[in-house]
Amino acid sequence: MADFHQNGIITTLHNLTRRPTEEMDAELLAFSEQRPMGLILPSLYSELEGDALPHIVEELTEVPYLSEIVIGLDRANEEQYRKALSFFSKLPQHHRVLWNDGPELRALDAELLRMGLAPTQPGKGRNVWYCIGYSLASQKAQSIALHDCDIVTYTRDLLARLIYPVANPRFNYLFCKGYYARVADGKLNGRVSRLLVTPLLHSLKKIFGELNYLQYMDTFRYSLAGEFSFRTDVLNDIRIPSDWGLEIGVLSEMYRNNSTNRLCQVDIADVYDHKHQDLSANSDAGGLSKMSIDISKALFRKLATQGITFNTETFRSIKATYYRNALDLIESFQADAIMNGLSLDIHNEEKAVELFAKNIMKAGESFLESPMEAPFIPSWNRVISAMPDVLERLKAAVESDNEKFS
């Protein structure tokens, strides 16, 4: 059972009493009359053939309070899109599948790209961005949750707890971040969060001082969780990164645009497990290696907007400070694991830290080489300003695909 401690500059909502899911569902159903709710599911086609997503869909069929489910489908041909429509057809809620690789959405994407307004690379960020656009166009929800499609331990109370803070009309929260312990199969997981983000934030605070932004980021118990919920009020103006810095970028945008008393985090699961990425120590093109570079760059970019000046010597100091902090934290994680009867491979932990230390330098070098890089997808406010009918066209494209192929 979680503690009730509040630390940092946003509210933490704990799981103190294990409320029955049915009780929360009934309360959320009542809220939905005043504040309709939706869900965004960014998905790869391959996840339809795995074990996690079929179970997630079964759980969602029992959710009574959602007005809409928006599924973003990546890496699917026409035959696979048809299968996806059939796969999701059991959902009783109003739902739409965005065929991101289909001709309708590709044509709109190409037009936006020519105007410099479209995502420049594929991935989760692009998928989420188009799903947000469709949700804004459909106007069926005022509070929207987003979670991954590879959660093998999924139960519908995760969604209930995730969306509750932005759905309850008595609360003033505009954004909520989910958190949980990454423990599965007798092991302590979550290496990037434990071994990169936490010690890197501690190192940045040691070097640059207790900046409000760093205090804010360090308040989140699991900053890399892929589970958020929003009031739709915040979605028009958010700029989403298109790389592995998505989660860090979203938190940074919430900090930029809103007062911290409108933001919170919530304990959404006792047990959470999903698809694990390889370390990919020999390649920066994928796995945890690419993830660590993208995340580091996202933090450096945000600090630069706060007036922090970087040079090669700065990044060397960050790397050295990080390396010492990360090694010290491994001892803490080892003690925690032992006390809870979990396993922790010290050798692999230190290998990860060594890789992340190198990648902090690579991220720094990339930052210095491309200071004018625009890493964010434009906000929907900007896109609408340039193409006033874009949301109507996006909605029409999605509806056309769903009608034509279903």
Image: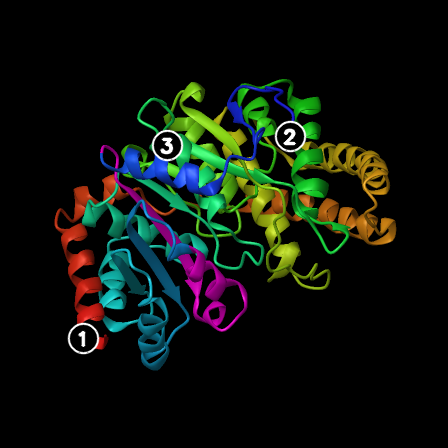
Q: Secondary structure at mark 3?
A: helix
Q: Which residues are magenta?
A: 34-59
Residue 38 falls within the magenta-colored stretch: yes
Disc 1 or 2, which lies upstream in sequence?
A: 2
Pointer 1 with pointer 3, Cβ within 8 A? no
From the image, state whether disc 2 or disc 3 is nearer to you.
2
Disc 1 or 3, which lies upstream in sequence?
A: 3
Q: Amino acid at mark 3?
A: Val
Pointer 1 with pointer 2, Cβ within 8 A? no
Q: Position of residue 67 (x, y in %)?
A: 26, 48
Residue found at x 29% / y 72%: 102
Would you call the spot at circle 3 few (<14 residues within 10 Å), some (14-19), or many (20 or more)?
Answer: many
Q: How far apart are labels 2 and 3 at the CA level?
A: 21 Å
Q: Amino acid at mark 1?
A: Lys
Residue found at x 27% / y 67%: 106
Residue on which the image places disc 1? 404
Q: Is residue 177 above or below residue 343?
A: above
Residue on which the image places disc 3? 166
Lateral position of residue 327 relative to residue 389, left or right:
right
From the image, state whether disc 1 or disc 2 is nearer to you.
2
